[in-house]
Each structure stands twice: as C-alpha cells, then as structure tokens.
Amino acid sequence: MRQLRLTALAVLGFAAALAAQSPAPADVIITGARIYTVDDARPVAEAMAVRGGKIAFVGSERGAMALKGSKTRVVNYAGRTIVPGISDAHAHMLGLGEALSNVDLTGTASYDEVIARVVARAKTAPAGAWIIGRGWDQNQWGDTRFPTQEKLSKAIPDHPVVLERVDGHAVLVNAKVLTTAGVSATTKDPDGGRIVRAADGAPSGVFVDNAMGLIFKVIPPLTKEQEKQALMAAIAEANKWGLTGVHDAGASRSTIELYEEIAKAGKLTMRAYVMIGDDSADLAYYFKVGPRSGLYDGRLWVRTIKLYADGALGSRGAALLDPYSDDPGNTGLLTSAPEHLRAVSVEALKHGFQVATHAIGDRGNRVTLDAYESALKEVPVADHRFRIEHAQVIDHADIPRFAQLDVIPSMQAVHQTSDMYWAGKRLGLGRILGAYSWRALLETGVIIPNGSDFPVEAVNPLLSYHSAITRQDARNWPPGGWQPADAMTRAEALKSLTMWPAVAAFQEAVLGSLSPGKYADFVVFDRDIVRAAPDEILAAGVVATYVAGAVVYERR
C-alpha cells in the first residue's frame, strides 16, 4: 500500500510539473489575416496569440490555436492585412486637438476662401470671442505672396482673428489683434523672427517664426480642462487612423503632466513618446527628475528634449547657406543661437536625455550637426540617438555626417509630396537635389523614422507610406514620381512607420515588430498595403487598431 501511495504521488507530481511547464492560455488569438511582422525571424505569418497585452506567439494558425483556452477570444480577420502598430515619429498632439475644434483652413485655394471660412465661424461665435484657425498656404493660391490683413480686418472687424499657416511657422492676424498686441511700425523684429511689413513699415498682418510670440502672448490660454479634452480628442483621432504610438514633438511641463493624468486614468490608448519643449524652467525640472521610460504599463516616455534651429521652407524661414532663389537677400532664420543648441545638448548628454532638433534648411542642418558634434566631444556618449527633425534640405557634404555622428534624420515623407510643387522655386536646380534625400541618407547606413508632423499634414500614416515608395501625391502625380531615385522600398517604408520609430525612441525591445514578448500593438487594414498597386494604397481603410491586445478603435 505504501508503495502504491508513493507511485500515485509521483504520478500526480509529474502531472503537476507538466501543467506548470505548459504555457498559459492566450487571451486573444488572431487568425485569417496576412500578418506582416517586420521581424526577420518570421516576416509573414497567418496567426498570432496575445497574452497579458503582449505577443505570445506568431506563426501558423495551428501553433496559435494550441494556446486556446476556455476563455480565449478568437478573432478571424479573413482576407484582412495586419501590420505592427504604426508610430508617427513626429507630430503635435495638442495642436491636432486644437485644430479639430478651430477653423480648418487646409485645402483653401485662395485668400477669399480663407476669409469665407472665418466669416462662417464668426457668425456663430460669441461677441468678441477669439477666432483661431490653421492650415492656409499661400503657395496653393494664384497669388503666392503673403496675404495682408486689410481684407480680413474688413470682413471680421469685431473678433480678434489669428490664423496659423499650415507649417505652424507663420500667423496672419487682423487689425484687432495688432491693436491688442500693441504691434506697430516701431516694433522691432525679435531675434529669429520677422514681422512682414508694408512699404511704410507698418505690420502687414503676417508674423514669421519667433515673431509669432508677439501674438501668442495675448491669446487667452486654454484652461486645463480644455487642454485635456483637446489631448483626448487627438488620441482618439490618431487611433482611428491606425496610430498606436506618437512622438509628440515638443510639450510643456503642464501638458506632460496632463498626459500622466490621462495615463493614470487608463485612457491613454497609445504609446506617447513626449518631447520636452525648450523652456529653461521645464528643462531644469526634468533634468532633476531624470529620463523616464515605459511609464504606466508602457504608455508614456519622457526622455527627449525638443529644440529648434530654424523655421520652415514654405514661409522662407528655413535657414539656408545661400539666399532663397525666389527671394534674393533672404537666407532664412536661425530661431535658436548655435551656442544654445550646443549648451542644451551638453546638459542633455550629462543627464541621460536625447535631443531632437527641428532643422529644415541646409544651414539649419549644418548648425545643428555642428552643435551635436561639439557636445559629443565634450560629453562622449556612445548610444545617444540624437535626432534632427525634418532634415529636408541638406548640403551634400553634410549627408555623411548623420552616420558619422550617429544622428537620426527623422523625416516626414508626405512633406516632400506637399512641397514638390514649389520647393524648386525656393531652392533652385542645384540645391533641390539635396532635398528630401531619403535614399542618399539610407545608403550611409542610418534609419529614417517617418511621420506626418500633424496637424501640418493629415493624420493618415498611409499618406507618408505612399509618398515614401512613390514620391507622388495622393492623386499619384507626377507620373514616375518626383526625384524617384530617392524613393524607399516597401520594406523600408513599412519599417519607417514601425521599427524605425521604435529605435529612434529607445523602444525596439518592446515595440516596432510583432515578435514574441513585445507589446501586442497592431493595425488591421482592409487590404494588403504591402502588395497593393501604388495607386490603390490610399484606398486602404483601418478595420481595427489594437494596443496591448485590446481594441482602441474599430470601424463600424
């Protein structure tokens, strides 16, 4: 009897050991779709299993179903396509949230159309209320000169009106705002900014780059609740387009704290990589706190500082080595002193922070590379992953420096197809060859995380995916693409929206591919964006967006 009891105990022990070794059942199993993993170990799969918000298995349907338990939910996305969660590597979340409620001026074909949209808003606005809009682009009008305030002021005399240019680097205001701000012919241009003036020196109504501060300081700020609601609206809008992550390119301490508040409440339905704006008090605070990664179950990262070197090409504020071809004598604006870029970079390296600097013109890019190089000599760090945001126009001699300094060019493919109609006039034939040079940069060995810069461009990440591989706009123009030799392959374009943003954000161990152990963030499309004809890519729609294995958006 004693021997039988020992044998029974042994059998039970062996069974318990086997049970302990068996993997726990999956929470969700996805089947039926063609899954592009962006993982070289298994590039394409037919099923995957999710457990605890992370990928437990990727491969065959047989393998995934082996993890099915009594409570496992099985979702069959027959005929659909799945890719890793898409991250926009350069965007402005609060700007998007505000744009969703302000006057939308994108796509306006004339100044008269801009005014008509503002007049329509003024009819429903409370008396004397500020009217804010964004999205005008004089390059899309018959007359491509900057507008002046007279027509706007005559049409809307009783409301202060501030209309931001599409790139966010210039504003147009009416006479009521000029009076409120106290700006006159005697007001001097601030460093790194320009007040566009009439022949008599009076302000024409347009303020470029740092001169916008003269206007922004008199606009009533959003309340905390308004800012929070704007962020929440932006998060929902991003999820709708398949975004599971965003690199928010410059936020104040108060905005970052709102992100934390939203995350604590379990409502941050994305991975937010939030860059600290260039404010001395905010930088002092975060240097003291130190870099933070993967907060609130991997929903929030605060470990990067956002700086500005110059303005934008469309408003002729991008800093160039030689004058603009269509504006002789104007070489653009340096919005920060080179020494400031270097000094902040040094402090960032000392405190373990990444730096990401806006630089569009070839002079802006050179000044930034010089600042980074000097800082790295003073504080040598191997894996710093410093970034240049936009990197649109680069002198040929500076292209190899990105790889030599381990600097990441964070670019937005859709900017190329938005700018190609007029960029040649700004830069001239020789310089344009160094603009939007993805292939030239990739061949040096760097990566290019992709994005939209929304609300400058639309949120839809497929616009940048399509632009990257075709060098064509949404109408598939021009035939063959604009400077097509610089196009990306489809594999590169997909990485530019998934794995490369993860690397640029120190997230590659947990994001960027559908690999076992990583977060189960993925997007379900209604067609195969990897194999579809180029002119069919933008017809693809998001069926569902998943973050940590949970649906955060589903098409109805």
Image (cartoon, rainbow, N blue to C red):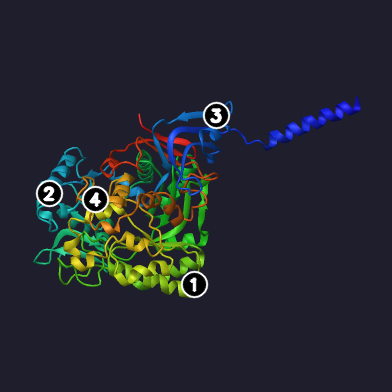
Q: Amino acid at mark 1?
A: Val
Disc 2 secondary structure class: loop
Q: Which mark is residue 110?
A: 2
Quarter of the image for residue 332 reads bottom left
Q: Which mark is residue 7?
A: none
Q: Which mark is residue 72?
A: 3
Label 1 or label 3, whichever comes before in sequence order? 3
Graded by Cα atoms within 10 Å as few (under 14), some (14 to 19) or many (20 or more), the crowding at tag 3 reads: some
Q: Which residue is painted at 52% across and 59% down in the image? A: 289
Quarter of the image for residue 346 reads bottom left
Task: Give the number of the mark in front: 4 or 3.
Answer: 4
Residue annotated with mark 4 = 472
Q: Amino acid at mark 3?
A: Thr
Residue annotated with mark 1 = 379
Q: Is residue 187 visible in this depiction of the protein?
A: no
Residue nearest the viewer, comparing 472 with 241: 472
Task: Give the number of the mark in front: 3 or 2.
Answer: 3
Q: Which residue is painted at 32% across and 54% down in the image? A: 412
Task: Give the number of the mark in front: 1 or 3.
Answer: 3
Horizontally, residue 300 falls left or right of residue 333, namely right
Residue 441 placed where, x, y %? 35, 63
Q: Amino acid at mark 2?
A: Ser
| Marks 1 and 4 in Cβ contact (< 8 Å) | no
Residue 338 placed where, x, y %? 35, 72
Label 2 or label 4, whichever comes before in sequence order? 2
